[in-house]
Image: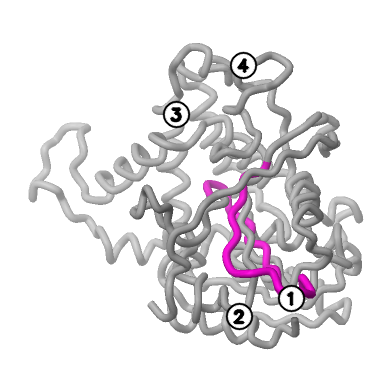
Amino acid sequence: MSGQSVGAVHSQRAHFDQPLQLRSGGVLPAYDLVYETYGTLNAAKSNAILICHALSGHHHVAGHYADAPENIGWWDNIIGPGRPLDTDRYFIVGVNNLGGCHGSTGPSTLNPATGKPWGADFPIVAVIDWVHAQARLADLLGIDSWAAIMGGSLGGMQALRWSITYPERVRNSIVIAAAPKLSAQNIAFNDVARQAILTDPEFHGGNYYEHNTRPTRGLRLARMLGHITYLSDDQMGEKFGRELRNGSFAFDFDVEFEVESYLRYQGDKFAGYFDANTYLLMTKALDYFDPSREDDGDLVKTMARSKANFLIASFTTDWRFTPARSKEIVAALLANGRNVSYAEIDLNFGHDSFLMEDAHYHGVIDAYLRNIKL
């Protein structure tokens, strides 16, 4: 890995008393956002980059905690001195979105009106709601304009939404492994995952906190399903093939194939730390994302509102958000005469490729960022 890690980091909390009107019609009277920063904001406050997280992500993007050195940020391989997101040059901000389960106001945090966890009463949130909340955090930090906003998957959708909703506040939008809206197949995958949670007997209509239990079986199944879609067929074949754990068929329904063992491990691990209500909210935000809906499905008209320069990146083996979906965004931007760079990167990790360390992929990001004028 080139460059260095940012080392020990700590999270911060910002409280907002101004009510936030949500796309769903609901209102959050007040809320907290947990965030982390890396590097130093320059005097002109022109070197800030916002990192938007994907479905299961959070604010801990880089470095580690002093009391938990094993807890390394989810995009640590790309952030730090000498890395593409060079903290000697840029001020990097990571935030846990509303509805999250890593400290920001969400279903598992206390509702001040009741003194109990929000649970099922927490309102549905949309990508545009996150963007409005992030804009308020930018105000708090004194950042009028982001040098870049960057994210993969659902994070890339936020970077795209920022460029449409706050065109004057985004100079560069880096959209990785994303899409202008979900396909029917993607919505279907999300619904099956939600059904696994909603039908878990321990779900209790979303108010499982009061029952001192968690719908871990449903969340485990949801993650197993999701994980299958994040990987490529070739990668799964290379990694597991049809390998048996014990070398022969057992003729029962226990774990026999190595891929089964892997998926159950990933499901159990995820269900151990993530909140089921947050999973429901995040997948719904994915389903609802469709900025062109405001323009009767005309993405060209929608992207006309953007003013940023763009880097759009996709991966050849990503079948959940295929390169064709990224090219839809590129075409809409080009139709508006926008300055857009496109990279289709040959990596074998499926949708998860955006998280991986790869010299070519990181080189693309690095080259783009080095051309940004601060």
Tag of residue 310? 1
Which is more N-terminal, label 4 or label 3?
A: 4
Position of 67 relative to 109 (above/below): below
* Quarter of the image where one finds residue 304: bottom right
**Label 3 or label 1, whichever comes before in sequence order:** 3
Highlighted magenta segment, given as a residue range: 33-57
Q: Residue at x 69, y 44 (%)?
A: 14
Q: Disc 2 residue type?
A: Ala
**Which of marks 2 and 1 precedes in the sequence?**
1
- In the rendered image, the residue lying farthest to the front is 43
| Residue drawn at (50%, 28%) of the image | 197
Q: Is residue 253 left or right of residue 263?
A: left
Query: Disc 3 marks which residue?
Result: 218
Q: Considering only order in the chain, which callout, 4 or 2, is on the residue closer to the N terminus?
A: 4
Mark-to-mark CA distance, 3 and 4: 23 Å
Q: Which residue is mark 2?
A: 343
